[in-house]
Image (tube, rainbow, N blue to C red):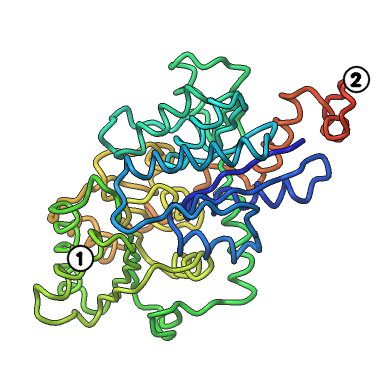
Amino acid sequence: MKVSVIVGTRPEAIKLAPVILGLRQDPRFECHVCATAQHRQMLDQVFEVFGIQPDADLNLMRPDQTLPELTCAAIGSVTKYLMAERPDLVLVQGDTTTVLAASLAAFYQNIPVGHVEAGLRTGNMQAPWPEEANRVLTSRLTSMHFVPTDGSRDNLLREGIAEDQIFLTGNTVIDALYQAVDQVRKNPPSVPGLDSGLMKNGVPLVLITGHRRENFGEKLESACLAIAELAVRFPEAQFVYPVHLNPRVRSTVWQTLVDASGRGLDNVHLIDPLSYLPFVALMERATVVMTDSGGIQEEAPALGKPVLVMRDCTERPEALAGGTVKLVGTDQAKIVAEVSQLLSNKSYYESMARVQTPYGDGRATERILESIVLRFGLNAMQLAAGTTEETVPLN
């Protein structure tokens, strides 16, 4: 059975890597990987970690590219790819522009779409923007919805998605995380841009990521001002921020944390984005995580790390309910108050620092592959050979 996996960004690559490896190791499937390269450098880093070589590279990334320009380019390029390859199924993951464009291109070619990490919702089309719209629209184009949690399944059922199109699998991010943690513990990587002593000396370390479009400008500046205030208040703590490559993110972060003060704060470390294994190592080392990312809300709780989400709402409520994740938005005073509590109040810290894995057990890939074979109702080896007289369900 021929499956095309279409990948555009670093988070997609991380979460689809276990699926790609699973498909390529399973003789029932012929797996083709198409990279749109929506994020060029960060995508390549993940492929290298997992030893994945794309079969097609559309190389769509352009400087200062607008969302309409990227979307149009992706639909056209993916369409040409699909017309040449003619897969039996297209797999996409998450909520990026690549996901929406690839799903629409596959729909136009009458090729079924499988959506990994389906059913996440905030109920607010403006947050996260444009990701909430991307996933809502993708759901209308999808034939197989691989949902990570019961809550995600319920979201789709409320929207009228047929129950027999929904498959509860867990999230492949946990599959990837478990593989990465095993590698990191066996062979600890260095973290480029960071003194190796900070990974070992046990002082409090706050890991920060921030890149959401809806936070561009004043909101990101407010979060950075909170970091600066915390760095002065807790001089013994180290604040590590791998800064996203987007120029609008980098200009705000550097202007607020370096240029405005006339000097860099000694305990604030602005480094380039990290490849996957060094980032996992840094997440394991961290005392607290501050983020507006989606995937980190799933990964960090599995490592027992308190997570403060710099957004007003989240499509991942399960860790909120478990108490390991808290929404703080981008208000400077609220961020400072919450981080201060975690760094100075042991009982408060321990109330959040618990291992929680509401997003899966590391076997999501296995369930996805089984679901594909069952859904198509064919033995995939027979399908590849062109003999479809008899259907054999997967036991």
In this rendering, is residue 115 above or below 280? above
284 left or right, relative to 271? right
Residue at point 29%, 76% (across, down):
269
Q: Residues within 10 Å of mark 1 (few under 14, many from 20)?
A: some
Q: How many marks?
A: 2
* For the residues bearing labels 2 and 1, Cβ distance under 8 angstroms: no
287 left or right, relative to 277? left
In this rendering, is residue 306 above or below 107? below
Specify the quadrant that holds the N terminus.
Answer: top right
In this rendering, is residue 150 above or below 51? above
Label 2 residue SS: loop
Judging by the rendered image, the residue that carries numbered circle 2 is 390
In this rendering, is residue 131 above or below 272? above
Residue at point 63%, 62% (across, down):
50
Specify the quadrant that holds the C terminus.
Answer: top right
* Residue 251 image label: 1
Q: CA distance from mark 2 to mark 1?
A: 61 Å
391 left or right, relative to 155? right
Residue 297, image x, y percentages: 41, 49
Residue at point 44%, 16% (across, down):
158
The amino acid at mark 1 is Ser
268 left or right, relative to 93? left
Q: Residue 130 is drawn in which quadrant?
A: top left
The amino acid at mark 2 is Glu
